[in-house]
Amino acid sequence: MDSLVCKDWHDLLGPLKSEPYFINAMARYDQDLAAGITCYPPRNEIFNAFRLTEFKNLKVVIIGQDPYHQPGQAMGLAFSVKPGIKTPPSLVNMYKELQNDIPGFVIPNHGCLTHWAEQGVLMLNSILTVQDSKPLSHSKNGWDEFTTKVIEQINNNSSHLVYMLWGSKAKAKCKMVDRVNNLVLEAAHPSPLSAYNGFFGCRHFSKANEYLVAMGKAPIDWNLPSVVSYP
């Protein structure tokens, strides 16, 4: 469909926030904080993927797993870290692929991807929170159900999007996506453990732009500014 049924994220996500899986996920996060357990990202950054990418401007969906679990890293965008934080290995590999795929791409000295988000790239983790130093610690709290419903809502209310699905979990998360009216790109995860099994050379970034242009949309400027500010 070309017309959007939902006008914004509030319309799309509002009904989901009253569901038990969402209520439980937020309650467990708050319970951990109350018990003195450090969790990431900070509460006001959990939904940055939606805050920084307007629904009406949505062009590309990238699915991650769960947030980075070390201090200062997680910021509510899959694969992204705050300015001043060392670029994580998976993002390093994404930059390497970009350098080989996008003419003129310059590998930045940071890992903050807000420039992509502001252009319409939704970088959504399957799990939105995590305990300090305990990966997947919030994986059974309801987030997985919530983000699956988010993808279903996106699929039901938009078309001509690009889905970049890296790794088996991302592919499973988006198995309901309409592959006739969207471009679904699949490859191995960019992690150092799997990047050489099909991520390198996948050319997803240029393929995404080619599709967007063919659909009459502006391509994504994948180059990142050398200086970024993050509130």
Image: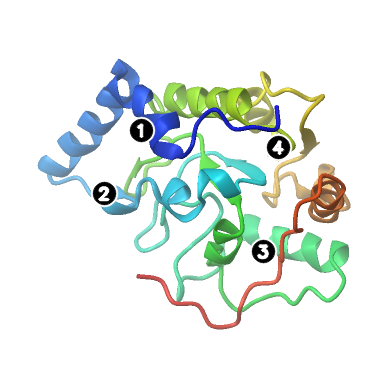
Q: Which residue is mark 3?
A: 92
Q: Which residue is found at the position 55% from the left and 60% from the top?
A: 118
Dot 3 amino acid type: Val
Q: Which residue is mark 4?
A: 165
Dot 4 amino acid type: Leu
Mark 3 vs mark 4: give the one in front.
Answer: 4
Dot 1 amino acid type: His
Q: Position of residue 123 (x, y in %)?
A: 56, 48
Describe the element under mark 1 as helix, strand or loop: loop
Q: Which residue is mark 2?
A: 43
Q: Earlier in the sequence, mark 1 or mark 4?
A: 1
Q: Which residue is found at the position 34% from the left and 53% from the top?
A: 45
Place residue 186 in its image quadrant. top right
Q: Which residue is found at the position 30% from the left and 29% from the top?
A: 25
On screen, residue 67 versus residue 24, left or right, reads right
Q: Earlier in the sequence, mark 3 or mark 2?
A: 2
Q: Are dots 3 and 2 in contact, CB under 8 Å?
A: no
- Judging depth in this view, the residue of 179 and 181 nearest the camera is 181
Q: Is residue 61 visible?
A: yes
